[in-house]
Amino acid sequence: MKLILTTFIISAASLAAQETTIFPDQVGDWKMAGPGEFVVDDGTATAKGGMGLWWYSKEKFENATLSLEFKMDDPSYNSGVFVRFPEPGNDPWVAVKEGYEVQISGRGVDDVSTGAIYKLQAAVANPLKPDGEWNKMEIHTLRNEIAVVLNNQLVNVFKTEKGRGDKEGYFGIQNHDDGSPVQFRNITVTPQHPKARLRNLTPRSAETVYELKRNPETKKKKEWFDDADFGPAFIQTWGDFYNDEYRPDAALKGMLLRPDPKAHNLVALYNLETMQVVTATDRGVSLDNTPFGGNHGTQNKVMNLGNPMFNSETGPAWADADGSFEDSRETPGHGNFDHLEFKGYFRHGHRIVLDYTVNGQDLLESVKIGDDNDFVRVLDKSAVEKPELLKAAPSPVKIVEGELKALTEGGPAIYPETFEVTPKIATGDDPFLVDQIPLPPVLKDSPYKNKVRLTDFDFFSDGDRAALCTWDGDVWLLSGLKEFKTLTWKRFAAGLFEPLGLKIVDDVIHLNARDGIWQVIDLNGDDEADHFKVFNYDVVITDNFHEFSFGLETDSEGNFYFAKASPVKPGGRNFDKILKHNGTFLKLTPDGKELTVVATGLRAPGGIGVGPNGELTSGENEGTWQPCCKLNYFTKDERPVFLGTEQARHEVTKDFKEPLCYFPMDVDNSGGQQAWIPDFAKVGLQAGEMLHLSYGQSSVYRVLPQELESGQMQGGVVRLPITLSSSAQRVNFHPEGSMYICGMRGWQTNAASDAGIQRVRYNEGTPLNLPEAMSVKGDKLTLVFDSELDEELATDPESFSIKRWKYMRTPQYGSGQFSIDNPDLEAEANAQKQESKGHKQQDDVEVTAAELGEDGKTIILTIPTLKPAQQMKIDYDLETLDGDVVIGTIYSTIHKN
């Protein structure tokens, strides 16, 4: 029978119904059909006699999940669970012939053993617990599918026969014979939404693992990333198969090694936390996670099921000084061991040499292909003084002296190609001229068959070159920026773990990847990285798909800053396991040695900023406890602060720190970086002004801040008239004064293309005609424009239209828009219990007077009902003295007036 797996398109949180306990709570609604009985005692039902059927008669179910526990003292006992059968009367064979039996009997893997659809389809595995232990079984009946999960493992997915149990039916359990006293307890039913999908209801990656076991030779559709060259070392979170069971955390910080560029599927996996060679195979990998397969809740996989060249158990490869291999980490399974320090690796052609210490001793290690086409682990002899501390590896080990050291001084380049492009210079009368920089070739036109999805960049001190990183793990060099006529791209490095932050310090490239902060260094001057040096590897990660690490900025003292997202569940609602760095804003000392938390409570900031006085900012994405996107802002003296996501509060006990400004979704649905205009910039904005980038709306906003006496910031934003080729993710300023912006399309955004980078120049002498400041006090709202305004329109209250509303910060996903002036208390209470994004109730705000200041640029609006508002929308329709139309919108937040 061919298996067709459905595609999940709706979140679990939006579909799941109330779970109801039907045994033992509703024992009176169960009926016996046929001989025998179930003896009920202390919440347990024990089968006796038979063959009979004990069935729940209160209602039949269409789409539902039946959950129960069962126990057998002897695996030869015989029983089963019946689903999707019609009312049987007193005939148990109705369930057998017109419904389906999920078998409970034996440890085999056939069509009459546990987990099978009896006599119709065997399970793919039988993870039955030892005799006398309770087993957990879940049976999902979804439309014409019956899925069986046994002890948290998906073991069967069966397509019903047309006309037989394909729509609805009852649930029941079997008493087979006097010699099979199988016991049952804790039986529950959860109705499911008609649009619910199996992937939404089963453990992570369960469908993929199931498909591999059911059809091991199944070949999935070829994707672009299957042929892409990610380098000889490719760091990701990797799962694999150990003893034929899927292991999702085989290597949270895992380096995939491809020592032979001509043998794409010949791979070995190294765990950079345990320093263990985990596995090797010649079947390659499956790239399933968000940047590649686009999936949530799954990991990339080493396809070693059934045929690994070798497999290692989970744990450290090296014992500590006491000879112990125990997982002694603060959170077992996550983070660094005290006796192991990964320092990075060297690349010599396609050969990779790892650099780490064991109990304080330096060690170099490499993996290479042996004479028998197997993998050989090569260790430097000088460090192996106590070989008994090395856990026995299932791969051959070769001890050498000096061989590896010679590979750490720079080797042959493997990306010699360069790509020249001609920038497209913009002309016209717009205030901002956007010069487009073509990207290097991608996919089939590229020798690397990859994408170039730019995520951050910085300039070298010579002003002629920039380094740019991509979501796929590359670092590119871009040169020729001074003359800006012919620009040259060159691939500098590959294989890093989804870097979303890059900073050049003293002409050394620093990268913020998901696994840590790296320096990538060219040792021999061939414009290609030979040394991948760990700058800090203390960040603790999980296998969650959403654990992005955003930005990399420095303050005036040389400290580095970046922010980590919280691990949301697939679909975006709520969170997986949260560890100490999830949802935090982090500070790293200039030497890379001390990592501290300066803020908690982030969900998905998208980007960060560091101001001239040590101010810290971030974007945010709406979600659980985050009513909408916003601009966070806090000072050095306020650290640490709590920014709203309760599950990621950690040890910060302070009240929630309100943002500078909230944003409706059509203004910013996914934040980017913040930046301050430097003194040397020539972009038509004043030095010290702040910008906020919206990745989601591909927009650049001028920030109009107001500091209150308490130190709290409030204010608004107005969009700059800049049209980009992709999203607005990162911004930087070239020494000659122009502004560069890069971005890519990876999650929710209206970006026009997969990626882009552009130079933005100010069209000298062209007015912006925009607000440059705003403030509130009492009943007055003051707006300052950067051009002199026509008095007639500026003093007409009808030139302004203002609305305001508030949001509800709750455990639900996002928030609707709620009235401040006429609160709907029932709707507000409901928002605590269920999502409220469909609620929209805005208040009209009357402007009774408008006054133009002596400078001709300042407008003072009188608003008798001016009050705090999480969101104000201020539309204006004005003209300048020269007759230019000035129409726009400010979105602002007022905490105090």
Image (cartoon, grey):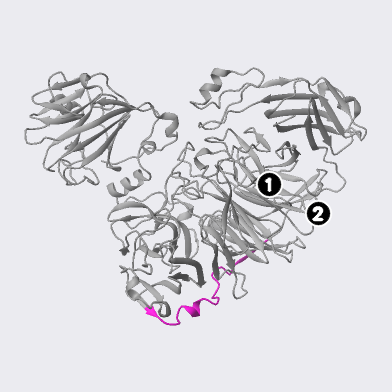
**Considering depth in this image, is 261 or 123 the residue closer to the camera?**
123
The answer to which of marks 2 and 1 sits earlier in the sequence is: 1
Q: Where's residue 664, x and y in %? A: 64, 32
Q: Can you say whether 575 is above or below 416 in the image? A: above
Numbered circle sitting on residue 679:
2
Residue type, mark 1 in image: Thr
Count of numbered marks: 2
- Residue sitting at 77 percent across and 63 percent down? 483
**Quadrant in which the C terminus is drawn:** top right
Magenta: main secondary structure? loop
Q: Where's residue 35, x and y in %? A: 8, 24
Q: Could you tell me if residue 725 is visible in this image?
A: no
**Disc 2 element:** loop
Magenta stretch bounds = 399-420
- Residue sitting at 58 percent across and 66 percent down? 520
Q: Can you say whether 373 is above or below 691 in the image? A: below
**Considering depth in this image, is 289 or 16 the residue closer to the camera?**
16
Q: Dot 1 corresponds to which residue?
A: 635
Taking the image as shown, residue 703 lies to the left or right of residue 446, namely right
Quadrant for residue 893, please give it.
top right
Foreground disc of the pair 2, 1: 1
Q: Where's residue 679, x and y in %? A: 81, 54
